[in-house]
Amino acid sequence: MKPIHCLLLVCMVAGLAACSSASSNTNPDQAAFVTLLGQDTLAVEVFEHTPQGMEATVVLRTPRTTVQRYRLNLGAEGAFQHMETEIREPGSPGNADLLVEETYVIEGDSLKVTVTENGQTETRAIAGHGQMLPFLDMIHWPFDLMLMRAHASGQDSVTQDLFTGRGSLPFVVRRTSEGAMTATHPFRGTMAVDVDDEGRLLKLDAGATTRKLIVTRVPASEVDIEAIAARFAAADAAGMPFGALSGRGETTAQVSGATITVDYGRPAKRGREIFGALVPWGEVWRTGANQATHFTTNRTLKLGDLTVPAGTYTLFTIPEPGGGTLIVNRQTGQGGTTYNEDRDLGRVPMTARELPEPVELSTIAVEETGGGGELQLLWDRTALVVPFTVQGQGL
């Protein structure tokens, strides 16, 4: 998808310096964020710091395009009081039913959460306190508050609790140098952040995390949020949606009497270099996205030189320029970033093949060959291949 606004295009291509100079004559309390995943625009946010707190309007494109409005109220010394959220279809009239409506209110040592969706309302309470801020997945205007608060503290490292509808996440914000900070998600990893002299977020690079996003600040005055929402909604209707960040795939094949099933996440290339870049050489990779890749066979297999009894396993890989290593692990049910080497069944070498055309979505295939089969990991222009044969009796 090409950028849909001339200023956004300038900012994405020319980088932060051009955008910062463009925004130097604007109100610093009003700004916008553009979030990219690879070459694709994932979200556009327009927000304003107000005397009462913050207000924001967001166009988010996954799993489908929605327009989201937020009103955050802060009390004395910046203490969180309440937040209202409205999520609607792009272009829907003001009197149209909302897709989702949420309220978050601090009551003593609890955060009261009320969510209305599909005509059903649910209310619950989680542990809360006045110094919390919201965590909105793939949305970053609350980070402006978090980073400014960390900057104002004068400390080199602070922990900031961000709440979700189900609990809270402790983020660690560190000052690394003049104009630079890091923000660490408790389990996704560490983001590098450029900030101005008040701690406002100028650019965020999540390339070292599981999200791989780039967020850039641009002038709010140059962003027509409703026009952007309409254009993204039109792309959805034309069969060109952004879709889920990483959908789930399943491969089932019959090879020499064995039934083999692989359940795995399917991240997209989105214009990025994959092996040796997004997926580093020499490091354990989840071999997909989100939950760990699960491999099930009802017959004993010989994967390379490794005997794999009938059952369910998880697969991890260590890619290298010439192929790398496939890891078969006995632990199951875990997330893809949870890897316990002590649970390895074994490791076998993979061979790399160059593909004639790039594969956009990470794909795992099981193909029958003359003497058995091949497990193939296909992404971008690379196939990582392990041969196997079927042994013994089934389950």
Image: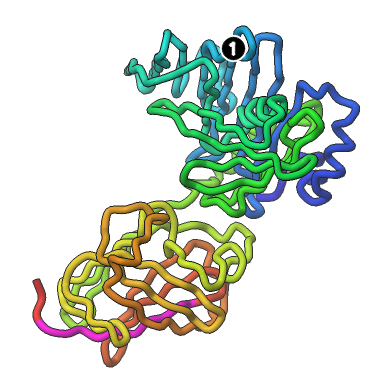
The answer to if 223 sits in the magenta stretch is no
Give the camera-side residue of 282 and 271.
Answer: 282
Main secondary structure along the magenta-highlighted residues = strand
Part of the protein shown in magenta: 383-392
The picture places residue 204, in percent across and down from the top left corner, at: 68, 43
Please tell me whether residue 275 is drawn above or below residue 195 in the rendered image.
below
Tell me, yes or no, if residue 226 can be seen here. no
- Residue indicated by mark 1: 73
Quadrant in the picture for residue 112: top left
Q: Is residue 49 left or right of residue 102?
A: right
Q: What's the amino acid at mark 1? A: Asn
Q: Residue at x 51, y 28 (%)?
A: 161
Q: Quadrant of the C terminus?
A: bottom left
Return the x and y of residue 340 as percentages of the image width and height.
Answer: 34, 61
Instruction: Give the residue at the far front of this rendering.
Output: 155
Q: Residue at x 58, y 66 (%)?
A: 274
Per the image, label 1 sits on a secondary structure element best described as strand
